[in-house]
Image (cartoon, rainbow, N blue to C red):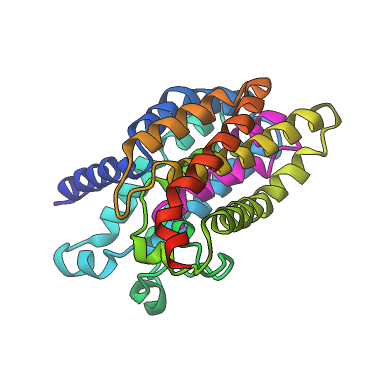
Amino acid sequence: MTSRLIRLRFLQLYRGSGDLGLFRVLLVIVVFLPLTAIFLVQHVAQRPWDAAIPAIVLYITWMIHVTRRDYHFLLAIVPHPRVVFIAEYVLFTVPVAVLLLSAALYVHLLLFLAALVVIASTVPSPAKIASRIVKLWMVPAGMFEWQGGIRKNLVVIVIFYIPGLFGFYHAGLSAASLFLLTMVFISFYSEYEPANMLAACNCRSLRFLVQKVVRHTGCFALFLLPLLLVAFVRDESRLITAGYFLAALNMLAFSILLKYYQYRPGAYSGAHQLLTTLACFISVVLPVALFFMLVNIFLAVVANRNLKSYLNDRN
């Protein structure tokens, strides 16, 4: 029973990865994870990495455990549900255990495994178990793309955000966080809202586009601002980090404008995912990122023309 449930969990993760898109998942697996492993192997024996990395992983595991939706279900059908929890959490954190073992941090490894057992043995509060809605009080009302996208990818966003908070140790951490978070947030705009939701703004097409781009990029800038400030501690990387910060905002504007450039009520665009992912990947070369500023002007003109039939005729 335990092995079947664990196989089912990995199958759910595989299916859930479709929300990010195949290209993004492959990019993370082939590029980001190997680079992260190399970086951690080089730094894990140095303070504060030897304690920070297991602590971050334990926090993410705890967050998953107290909000998991199948807690009562497993209590009802499995004789020893805590064995399932422990097996799942140990399997998912094998890379951290191997990392600590390779660095001869045996005490850290024992404490890490003990903490996993404690987390798996903890009973989440009824309020946490009953709640099926992630409270997003910081997301302004009306930003439905963010409401749905963050709920689907909350754990992924947390995992990608945390390395950037350590950007004062290595500038690459901040750059990687900016890149990966941008990849996640631009995926929110691949699904097009129905025409009645579009008309609810009660404004003309140009005003709608300007308000949406300014509002969403402004919120994204506030979200990324802590990563930018942390990275600014390193004098030698301030200009590059600021460049990637502006490129991230430009990519979000590109994703929004591309959405309304090819807007079709209630549709879903795989082309949007592919184009925005490729654009984000190309923007790693900062001089090339300037090209997409010109592309955004073109997209804005055509998107405004495309939305006129949905908005201007009703206002």
Name the one closer to the observer, 215 or 97.
215
Q: Which residue lies furthest to the right in this view?
A: 235
Q: Does the magenta stretch include residue 92?
A: no
Res. 141 visible in picture: yes
Name the one closer to the observer, 150 or 187.
187
Percent coordinates x, y for residue 254 in the rendering: 54, 39
Check the image and report above or below for 35 versus 78: above
Res. 169 visible in picture: no
Check the image and report above or below for 114 versus 311: above
Percent coordinates x, y for residue 133 in the rendering: 39, 70
Secondary structure of the magenta portion, mostly? helix
- Give left or right: position of 78 versus 173: left
Name the one closer to the observer, 259 or 227.
259
Q: What is the number of callouts on the image? A: 0
Q: Is residue 156 magenta?
A: yes
Residue occupying image coordinates x 55% and y 41%? 301
- Give left or right: position of 194 versus 212: left
Residue occupying image coordinates x 77% and y 45%? 229
Percent coordinates x, y for residue 235 in the rendering: 86, 31
Percent coordinates x, y for residue 231 in the rendering: 75, 38
Where does the magenta region start and end?
A: 150-176
Name the one closer to the observer, 147 or 231.
147
Residue occupying image coordinates x 48% and y 23%? 31
Q: Residue furthest bottom?
A: 127
